[in-house]
Amino acid sequence: MSNDGDKHAGLRLHLSSSCSTGYKCVYEHFGRFQAKRWVDGKEVYLGNFDTAVEAAAAYARAVGGFQPPPPTVVTESEGLRLHLSTSNTTGYAGVTFYRVGQYHARTRVDGRKRTLGVFDSPVEAAVAY
């Protein structure tokens, strides 16, 4: 194993067949390598590195250490029982993150997705759902 590999022992590097560097979210930039990631719809720059492996290790540390805070889930609002979901990061069925500070409420009608609206909070979107 190379010295780069030894330095990053214990980290699970995220391989990518679609990225020219071979690592997810690692890009060649003017002869060096950048690592980036997305948090809450925003691109977060992790740094420039001499090797793709160093950039991949930075990405692995960033995504491995990042745990979004659990959402505060309200089970009732406006007299309605809300549809909860354990497989959705918002905590509500039919509600997805849209962009910073906004949430979509969507449902299916006749097999097609229908947007119910864009809301300022996941609870407001869950009420619409």
Image: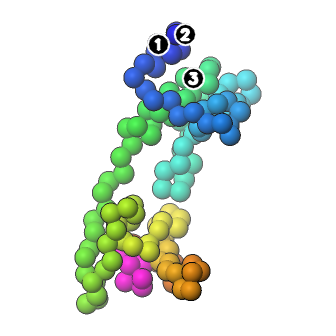
Where is residue 58? Give x, y as percent.
50, 30
Mark 2 surroundings within 10 Å by alpha-carbon count, few (fewer than 14), some (14 through 19), many (20 or more): few
Region in magenta: 123-129
Q: Nearer the viewer, residue 95 or 42?
A: 95
Residue labelled with disc 1: 6
- Please name the amino acid that badge 2 sits on: Ser
Give me the C-alpha separation between circle 2 and circle 1: 6 Å
Residue at point 50%, 74% (across, down):
104
Residue labelled with disc 3: 53
127 in magenta = yes
Under circle 3, the secondary element is helix
Mark 1 surroundings within 10 Å by alpha-carbon count, few (fewer than 14), some (14 through 19), many (20 or more): few
Residue at point 44%, 40% (across, down):
63
Q: Nearer the viewer, residue 73 or 49?
A: 73
- Compared with 20, 92 (above or below) is below
Q: Main secondary structure of the magenta part?
A: helix
Residue labelled with disc 2: 2
Specify the farthest residue to the bottom. Answer: 79
Where is residue 78? Give x, y as percent.
29, 88
Residue at point 50%, 63% (across, down):
100
Q: Quadrant of the C terminus?
A: bottom left
- Please name the amino acid that badge 1 sits on: Asp
Under circle 2, the secondary element is loop
Where is residue 126? Give x, y as percent.
38, 78
